Image: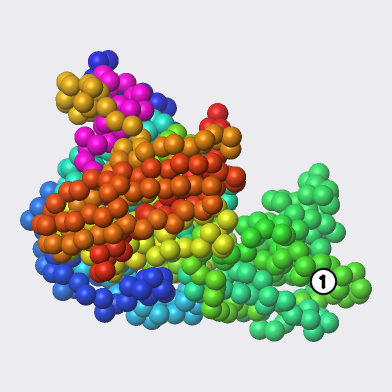
Amino acid sequence: MSNVVSVFPNRKKKLHTTRSWDFIGFPQEVQRTNVESNIIVGVIDSGIWPESESFNDAGFGPPPIKWKGSCQVSSNFSCNNKIIGAKYYRSNGIFYQSDVKSPRDSNGHGTHTASTAAGGSVSMASLYGLAMGTARGGVPSARIAVYKVCWLDGCWDADILAAFDDAIADGVDIISISIGFPEPRDYFKDSIAIGAFHAIKYGILTSNSGGNDGPGLATISNISPWSLSVAASTIDRKFLTKVLLGNNKAYEGVSINTFDLQNVMYPLIYGGDAPNITGNFTSSDSRFCFLNSLDPALVKGKIVLCDTLSSGREPFFAGAAGAMMQDGDAKDFAKSFPLPLSYLGTREGGHIRSYMNSTSNATATIYKSNEENDTSAPRVVSFSSRGPNVFTPDILKPDIAAPGVDILAAWSPLSRVTRVIGDNRMVQYNIISGTSMACPHATGAAAYVKSYHPTWSPAAIKSALMTTASPMSGGLDNDAEFAYGAGHINPVRAINPGLVYDAGPIDYIKFLCGQGYNRTALRMITGDSNICSHNINGTVWDLNYPSFSLSTSRSEVISRVFNRVVTNVGSATSIYKSSVTAPPGLKIQVKPAILSFSSPGQNLSFSLKIEGTVASSIVSASLAWDDGVHHVGSPIIVHVALKRKP
């Protein structure tokens, strides 16, 4: 049909699974505006638990006048002056037993993300005493509009597109979507990219999670240049779980263990010594504690040692009293399990195996987790998806990093702590990790900037967040900007960035024309018959992006010019001087090197030229504009091009 832009299968996407705001320098007492209560955060997720104290509407007036949405009220769901709108979407009409046919959240994920972005302040929140403190969102006075698209079997494209359309029509200010496909898709075959493109035409920024498929390169899935793509970083809190052996040797692993074995010592058994032979499993299966691989008769009432990390379902279903899991993978975030469990390294695991081999009566106990200070934070967590952007390598992704590890936030009491059947812990607040948790931190920060600058475009808000981000160390994260983008989010600095790299729909259209996208489809999207004509065609290097990325080859002699425009949003008259840091082998020039502004809102252009060669896969540099008050930073990354995944 002539009015169809693109056709692609209705694919399934998945959800990208208190102290964090303080850690990024955003305390409860931070200065706020009255406009914050008029900001509407649209959350596309698994729904919401409206009775949570995080969504109490005490002190809230009626919804903002601009609000045009509605609430799908039912016998089990209603909105209030905090949650001002809620809808659910299920295009195939199929509902499973655990699905709730309303905007009510039976998963927990949507409640968690909504409260992280815009939940009210709730004191004495914790998970069984862990992470005790005040739980709050980035913009606690803002309103929330909920669009439930995720169900037991995932989140489907058709529902996501419908939710975007409604959120735009309803009048939301920011869209937060912690959902993604396991691998990146072409921009116009990705429902999130399409929805976010529609949103920017109406002045709405979309904040989305980068994905949880790291640490490999080129794994980031939400990559559209008109969206804010967020990586997950650690905060200065970690959860450690001690185990004590019968020989009085103690070791610490990583987990969120709320169970108390009350110092009782239980028999220890190695998973490889307890295969479920009747189920046709061998020790090569049971050593890893694969599902159904353990013999319940051998492990019941014992603590099982497994040779890799798993969900803990198998030891739990087999009746084990607890489990220890050991392998060499990263241990930079903690998980909850349905039974007492500690996740250890191979060195600790080796000591435990030696002890078990030294006696016929090996015993152990597992203690409740303790919170400890993580002095290496912030750093990008291992699971966070990395760049480069496989479809447009010269657009740096992710854009920014935000807290996404061990985050306490509101939860649906219909969902178990671990979502494992038989785990009967139902809670109001839960601790989970993921770029899903990082995304609403960026959403809340974007909403905070919007409350100070209601007329700013999505690109201006995004630029403010990126150019004021706190630097992160390539020494801690070997993938450098491919791990953390422009750096670690800093909402307080972002409200006064000095300069912004602005862009509008036409700029992205020029970019898409330059990328060779179908003119007919772009004409339908824009309504402009002159689309992709000579004067509406741009290169990727001229898209007014706050970061600079260039793909090359090791043997190539580089000579590339980027053109940019910055808008003065600081002092009426100001002089910005440029400074560049570049590694050996690269020459980076900025012309002009000084920008003199004489009025607010004034635009000035500059070019940045990169010359030279690279000796390694990733080479980092940076550009900063400084007027003595504002420091406007941009990462520059030159990298050896990776082959696109098939």
Pick whichever, 444 or 558, lies toward us.
Answer: 558
Indicate the quadrant containing the N terminus: top left, top right, bottom left or bottom right.
Answer: top left
Name the main secondary structure of what is drawn in magenta.
helix
Q: Farthest top residue?
A: 1
Left or right of 368? Residue 293 is right
The answer to whether residue 38 is visible is: no
Which class describes the residues within 10 Å of circle 1: few (<14), some (14-19), or many (20+)? few
Residue at position x 44%, y 57% in the image: 581
Residue 462 % position (x, y): 29, 53
Left or right of 444? Residue 97 is right
Where on the picture, by quarter, is residue 77? bottom left
Residue 573 among magenta residues: no
Helix, strand or loop status at disc 1: helix
Pick whichever, 71 or 217, lies toward us.
Answer: 217
The amino acid at mark 1 is His
Residue at position x 47%, y 53% in the image: 582
Q: Which residue is mark 1?
A: 351
Residue 551 % position (x, y): 48, 38
Region of the chain picked out in magenta, as a range:
501-522
Residue 257 % position (x, y): 59, 72
